[in-house]
Amino acid sequence: MNLLALVDCDNFYASCERVFRPDLKKIPIVVLSNNDGCVIARSKEAKSMGIGMGVPWFKIKRAYLAQGGRVFSSNFALYGDLSNRVMHVLSGMSQSMEIYSIDEAFLGLHHLQDPRDAYAFGIHCRSTVHQWVGVPVRIGIAPTKTLAKVASHIAKKRNGGTGVACLHTAGQIKRALRDIPAHEVWGVGRQLSSQLNELGVISAFDLSEVDISLIRKKFSVVLERTVRELRGEPCLEIQEKNAPKKQIIVSRSFKTRINNQEELKPLISNFAARAAEKLRNEKQKCSKVSVLIATSPFEKTSQYRGFASFQFSTPTNDTRSILLGATKALNDSFKGNYIYAKAGVLLSSFSCQEVEQQSLFQDMRDGLLLQPSAELMQCIDLLNQEQQQIYFASQHPESFARVQTKMMSPRYTTNWHELPTAS
Amino acid sequence: MIIHYLGTISADDLPAAFIRFFADSVSVGFPSPAGDYLDSPIDLNKYLIKNNVATFLVRVSGQSMIDANIADQAILIVDRSLKPKHGSIVVASLDGDFVCKRLQLKPRLCLLPENPAYEPIYIQHGQELDIMGTVTAAINQFK
């Protein structure tokens, strides 16, 4: 039997904040989204204080701090670097690996001769990651990805245990599935679960017992795969090559509210320029730029979400074209008399940089006559990498200064001026 | 002369290295006599860092390790994957702060400074000592 392991970092962002802060070992930690809007990660201690995922920071701030909790603005330079390190350690432990997200990876365990060695592998893997990088992980091992998710769930629940759970015998799998509600199975969710309840499916075990043809008829091939995977039939393989991104989003909630287009425009330009930079980093071009603007759902003012897109006739990754497109999309999505709290720019309809599809009309309409310049963009990207901030006239230069809020931890591993110190 | 037909060969069949051979001899003029000695330049990262995913940099503050040639503001190269031994220089966390000291395991667990002006730190019963990693090198900059 071929087994695979799901390695999942425990409360990743909160754990990263502890690597260079041994004084915060047992202290509750929450990490906030960009601009400190809401809680995006919680340490175990913060969870047991009842802090929910995604709650707006202003709602819990006072009570949380009064109880001695600590808070951090998100520090993606640190999380990204530690994530890379974790993934590198893991890649040395298996011949096949799929990086599933910033804090999760699947490992193929074909190299294990005997499934009974899997548990020991898990223990070794976990202690190596912890020793080398300093973040705790939990490991679920099973014959399929969906069951590995279940195993990882068990590894998490067994509090104070080894952080490793292995499901390889039929008996182990059956017992595990009985304890888990169907909606907690990977890819099921609450929406499907009410329909499943009508069929008498309550636990994950019930789901695994449903007749396949019924599932296919009443639901979808996707759920059929889930059921097969619960039965131990692998349907989802480890995907080693990262599929190229399909879209790029740059969005923020604002520190102060904005109600006019003049103030919104430079911020949209910032998002567009950043998105264009990411696009070039991915070696892609896009045919569509969209702008999203929204009021705050937490305020009692009138609500509006605006969304508009601009289509290029030739795929582009030139910041200047993307800025023009974003400005037009902002024009189309903006409505006066609303108080905006959030905005974003989305790039989509990608094609590879090498594939040049020349359009007969070269975006001549709407004054978008522009000779794209790969050299210029490369030059700008290089300068910006060296922290020489080059920006376009429509952007908002003040917002470039890295907002080193009091709540952001140092970039311990990526910046010479912010290294940890020892006396 | 008799010519035997052996088969066809296309550029795709050639190993990548084969191409470079041609690329060298196309240029007009005397080929570089160094061309056969393709060494890569000296890489300090490789020299100083054996296991880069487990290696972190830490800045020293203070003179407590001066006799081990670790000056104030030196950059320490700390490898978390090496098991600290008796006599290793380590970065450890002690009551929530990082310290750089020489680890003494026997006769008694202790962190030794390398400066007579500083006192050894004996680990008291119940006190928590976490070793972050072993210091493999220190970079003192003079300019």
Image (tube, helix red, strand yellow):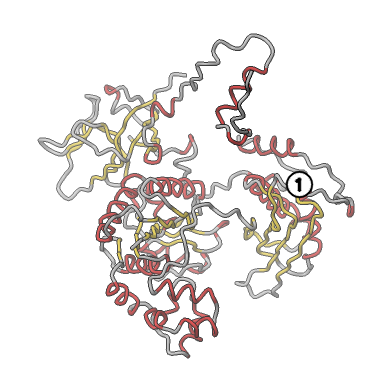
Please tell me whether mark 1 sits on a helix, a strand or a loop: loop
Position above or below: A236 against A129: below
Closer to the camera in the image, B41 or A369: B41
Residue B129 x/y as whole percent: 23, 45
Closer to the camera in the image, A296 or A149: A149
* Residue drawn at point x = 72 percent, y = 55 percent: A268
* Residue drawn at point x = 41 percent, y = 51 percent: A16
Residue B131, by quadrant, is: top left
Position above or below: A198 against A389: below
Residue A342 x/y as whole percent: 66, 62
**Residue B1 falls left or right of residue A92:** right
Residue sitting farthest toward the front: B2
Residue sitting farthest toward the left: B107
Residue A33, by quadrant, is: bottom right
Q: Quadrant of the C terminus of chain A?
A: top left
Q: Quadrant of the N terminus of chain A?
A: bottom left
Name the residue beneath numbered marker 1: A356
* Residue drawn at point x = 34 percent, y = 59 percent: A138
Q: Amino acid at mark 1?
A: Glu
How many numbered marks does the figure carry?
1
Closer to the camera in the image, B100 or A367: A367
Residue A243 x/y as whole percent: 57, 55
Circle 1 chain = A
Position above or below: B126 against B53: below
The residue carrying pointer 1 sits among few (fewer than 14), some (14 to 19) or many (20 or more) residues within 10 Å by Cα, namely few
Residue A276 x/y as whole percent: 69, 48
